[in-house]
Image (cartoon, grey):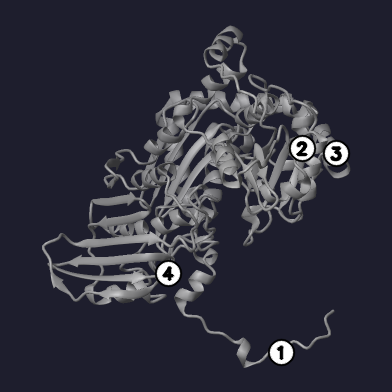
Amino acid sequence: MNNQEVIYDETNIVKLEWWEHVRLRPGMYIGKLGDGSYPDDGIYVLLKEVLDNAMDEYMMGFGKSIQIAINEGVVTVRDYGRGIPLGKVVDVSSQMNTGGKYDSKAFKKSVGMNGVGIKAVNALSSYMLVQSFRDGETKAVAYNRAHIIENRPIEASDEPNGTWVKFIPDEEIFKDYHFQDKYVEPLLKNYVFLNSGLTIYYNGKKFYSKNGLEDLLNENMTSEALYPIIHLQGADIEIAITHANQYGEEYYSFVNGQYTTQGGTHLSAFKESVSRAIKEYYNKNFEYSDIRMGITAAIAVKIEEPVFESQTKTKLGSKDIGPEGPTVAKFIGDFVKKELDNYLHKNPETSDILLRKITDSEKERKAIAGVTKLARERAKKANLYNKKLRDCRLHYSDAKGERLDETCIFITEGDSASGSITQSRDPNYQAVFSLRGKPLNTFGLTKKIVYENEEFNLLQAALNIEDGVEGLRYNKVIIATDADVDGMHIRLLIITFFLQFFPDLIKNSHVFILQTPLFRVRNKKETIYCYSEEERIQAIEKLSPNPEITRFKGLGEISPTEFKHFIGTDLRLDPVAMKKSDAVKEMLEFYMGKNTMERQNFIIRNLVVEEDI
């Protein structure tokens, strides 16, 4: 212990302005920062906070369309709601905890941050302009990092009512950021799926939904539905349900238009209610897991004054629908019990198909029951006592904390590669799982193989996903293989395993590919790691003349000291994603099935010979 006296007096007490606190601790307000490479990066949260205010107006019955433009990092959003009261434009955009959502009479089922959201956008933007149009007049104010740089007086205007917001995320906060349509467009689609009749225009594209959550499932399902989607609506609740011939469970849950990616009380109640209603309808003692195997479903509820478990509102914590309403569980349970039971009675063809799906799942579960108990025990002992799993101290499935989103597990092959990563990792958040050789091609096999195959049984146990992704111990499952033919093959076999038996992992954005450098270019003063041929050429030009060039042929060739860079602050990951157009079944059949000649001809037609460097 340091014997030097630590002084603690009045000088240690510091009062920050609201905007200083947001900029100093942005994670408290918008989650992680990022540069736009991932859907939960901060720039998309800023966009969403502005859109949520527009959506609140629509949900209250004002305005039928929203116009959005994003060009070179500059974002504009125009809604046609009532417009901010002109005398309060400055307060609403720059006074923390000032807003119109505290009184539930005005915003009964609001989405936004209740007086925080637009201010967080203001503090984290190098420029923001807020302009309100209201009853033939307009008021505008512009900011630089929350400081007013222009405060226009109220003027006459012939523009329709509404609000126009323009902002530029601050590059001091969001380094080299870039908005990507592949993340912006799903966000906008969810808004229209949840608000039938709303039209959103984005950079020349139109987004509109007629059938709500039914459209959402049709947009997102990667396997063919076994029966027509069951689409039920009531006051403040909408659900959509179907099943497919796939493993796992797939859910989309929303509260007041907010996509709750981590679920919460409403999703838990929904899953319980659906299982119970179906079990009671057939009057059979089905296991809930058999009822839900292969389910794809969505639920959207509206509640007053929702309470979320984080500032970014990804998990609902509310237990009641409103101050005077029933519990969330009773509200959802009563609706599902009545409406789903009625639907199944009125649609016997659907109920017959659903019954066959449940009994098929039951038969498969019973068929593997004999091997699962022994396999679980074997996996538990193996992961505890051998070197296949080098675990981390904290886990994603723990009570959520500030940095648990950073938890990850590297799946690698071979002792040298796993050894290098193990020595380089952060043992608090990064685990390592070592494969032994190439894993089995699981395409077309049943889940029994998961328990009979030692490698996959141990991997399943390490991830803790046997009963679903809710128990997942790591937020990111990172496939770390060599960038050669064998490494690519191993990568494909692992992805096939996940697609076949645990598609939820990929659909919920938990699976990634680790990028590692192909080259090291260095001289006596500087070292540059290159991830492509283009980067190698640029590095040679920068470090000329005659720098030393090393080609990494495998992860085992990268020293632990160097590896620390690639799995630390410079961690580069490619997400493994799925969408409906991927036609997963057909894709796996082509690449992993027995159509040898067809695949051989494809390889010959697309063969590229890499020249030696």
465 relative position to 200: left or right: right
**Whole-number angstrom distance, CA of label 3 to CA of label 2:** 28 Å
- In this picture, residue 291 sits left or right of residue 445: left
Characterize the local packing of mark 4: few (<14), some (14-19) or many (20 or more) Cα atoms within 10 angstroms. many
| Numbered disc in front, either 3 or 4 | 4
Q: In the image, which disc is placed on residue 7?
A: 1
How many angstroms separate mark 1 from mark 3 (CA)? 51 Å
- Dot placed on the residue nearer the N-terminal end, 3 or 4: 4
Dot 1 amino acid type: Ile
Mark 2 or mark 4, whichever is nearer to me: 2
Amino acid type of disc 2?
Glu
Which amino acid lies under the numbered mark 4 shown in the image of this protein? Answer: Ala
Give the image location of residue 419, x and y in percent: 81, 42
Looking at the image, tell me whether mark 4 or mark 1 is earlier in sequence order.
1
Residue that label 2 marks: 557
Residue bearing the label numbered 3 = 382
- Residue 288 lies left or right of residue 180; in this view the side is right
Query: 1 or 257, which lies in front?
Result: 1
Residue 1 pos. (x, y %)? 85, 79
SS under mark 2: helix
Q: Earlier in the sequence, mark 3 or mark 2?
A: 3
* Disc 2 to disc 4, C-alpha distance: 45 Å
